[in-house]
Image: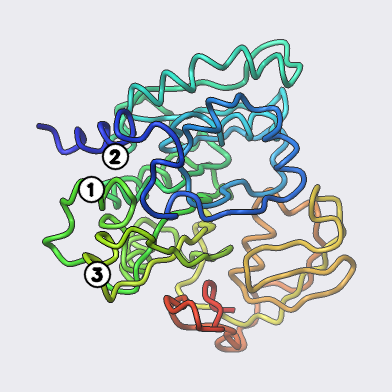
Amino acid sequence: MSRLDPIKQYYGETLQRTEDLKTNACCTIKNYPPHISEVFALIHPEVMEKFYGCGLTIPTALDGLKVLDLGSGSGRDCYLLSKLVGPTGKVVGVDMTPEQFDVANRHREYHRQQFGYSESNVEFILGDIEKLDLLNFEDASFDLIISNCVINLCQNKQAVLQEAYRLLRPGGELYFSDVYSDRRIPPHLLDDQVLRGECLSGALYWNDFITLAKQANFHDPRMMEQTPITIENSSIAQQLEGINFHSITYRLFKLDQLESSCEDYHQSATYRGGVAAMEDLFILDQDHHFKLGHSTAICGNSFRMLNQSRFNRWFDFSGDFEHHYGPYSCCNQSSPPMDSNSKQSGGSCC
C-alpha cells in the first residue's frame, strides 16, 4: 500500500461531509467576512459540503492574479478565488484524491454561469503536491499560492515549501492555513490513520515549521490568525493528552532580501486606501495594522513586504536602506500560544 493510500481513502471514502469529522481541526472558522460569505452563497452545495479546511486562506487585493491551490479538495477555495480574481485571473487546483477531484471538476460550468464569465478561469489537476515538479508548472508562474489544512498531511513538507518558492513570482506569497502543535508529535502516533486524516498527527511543531520555512527561503513568516483546536472525541483526546493544537494562518513572501531578524532603518509606510474589504485599515499580519492616512513605523522586512509586492500601489513610503540603526524593537519574539488561556499574540517579530 502506498503511503498516500490511507489519506486518499479517508478523504475519498471515509469522509462524506464535514459532519463526519471527529474534531474541529478542519472547521475552525465560524464567521466569515461579508465579501467572502457573499461568494459562498453562489458556490454549489456539494462543493461546500465536501470541503475540509481549517482556516480562511484568501488574502486581499486579488484582482487579475494567477493562483495555485495546493490540496484543493472539492474546490471550494478555488471557486471562491475564481470570483475574487475576476475573469482576467486564473486559478489552478491540485489534489491527489480522485473522489474530491471529481467533485470539484464537474462543477466548473456551474460556477462559470454563476459568476457570469464567458469561460471558466478554473482548472483542476489530479496530482501530488509533494511532487509539483512533475506537473510541468513553469518557474515563477504564480502570483499567489494557497493551501487549506493540507500540508500537515504531507510526509515531505520541505518539498512542498521549496516547490512553492520556486513557483512563485518575486514578490508573490504563500498564504496558507494548517494545524500546528505545541510540541513534536510522538513517533508512535505519526502513522495513525484517523489522527492523520483528522490533520493532527501530521501537525508540525511550531518551531520546526519556522525552521523549514526559512530553509525554503521564506524568511520571516508572518502569522495572520490562530484558533485553538478542540477535540471532542474522547478516544482521540486520550491519545493526544498533553498536546495542544492550533489552526494557524501564515503569510510567507518570496523576497530575496528579507533578513532573518527585524532591523531598524527608520522607515515608515502610509496606507492610502483602496484595498477592497480593507478600506480603513490594512492588515499585513496580526501585528501590523495600517490606518488609512496614518504614517506607521516599520522594520526593513515589513517595508520590503509592502514595497516589493502587489501592495505597493496602495502605500506611500518613507526611508531607505542606506543607514542601519540596529535591531528593530520587536513586539513578539516567541512561539504562538498553545494554551487557550494565554493572551499573548504570535507571529512576526516587529
Q: Residue at x 61, y 83 (%)?
A: 324
Q: Secondary structure at mark 1?
A: loop
Quarter of the image where one finds residue 286: bottom right
Give the mark nearer the N terminus: 2 vs 1: 2
Query: Which residue is disc 2 drawn over?
Result: 130
Q: Is residue 274 left or right of residue 95?
A: right
Residue 128 placement (x, y as % from top left): 30, 32
- Residue type for callout 1: Gln
Quarter of the figure with residue 232 = bottom left
Dot 1: few (<14), some (14–19), or many (≥20) neighbours within 10 Å? some
| Residue at the extreme front of the image, as rendered | 234
Tell me if mark 3 has few (under 14), some (14-19) or many (20+) residues whose alpha carbon lies within 10 angstroms of its own: some
Q: Are marks 3 and 1 in contact (CB under 8 Å)?
A: no
Q: Considering only vertical position in the picture, is 133 above or below 30? A: above
In the picture, measured across the screen, residue 73 lies left or right of residue 37, that is left
* Disc 2 + disc 1, Cβ < 8 Å: yes
| Relative horizontal placement of residue 5, taking residue 44 as reference (left or right) | left
Q: Position of residue 350 (x, y in %)?
A: 59, 79
Amino acid, disc 3: Arg
SS at badge 2:
helix
Q: Residues within 10 Å of mark 2 (few under 14, many from 20)?
A: some
Q: Give the residue pinned by disc 1.
A: 155
Instruction: Residue at 72%, 53% (x, y): give it.
Output: 311
Point out the tag, 3 or 1, that comes first from the N-terminus: 1
For the question of whether residue 255 can be seen, the reply is: no
Give the residue pinned by disc 3.
184
Q: Secondary structure at mark 3?
A: loop
CA gap, disc 3 to disc 1?
14 Å
| Above or below: residue 259 compared with residue 13 | below
Quarter the N terminus occupies: top left
Q: In the image, is 2 to the left or to the right of 35? A: left
Residue type at the position of mark 2: Glu
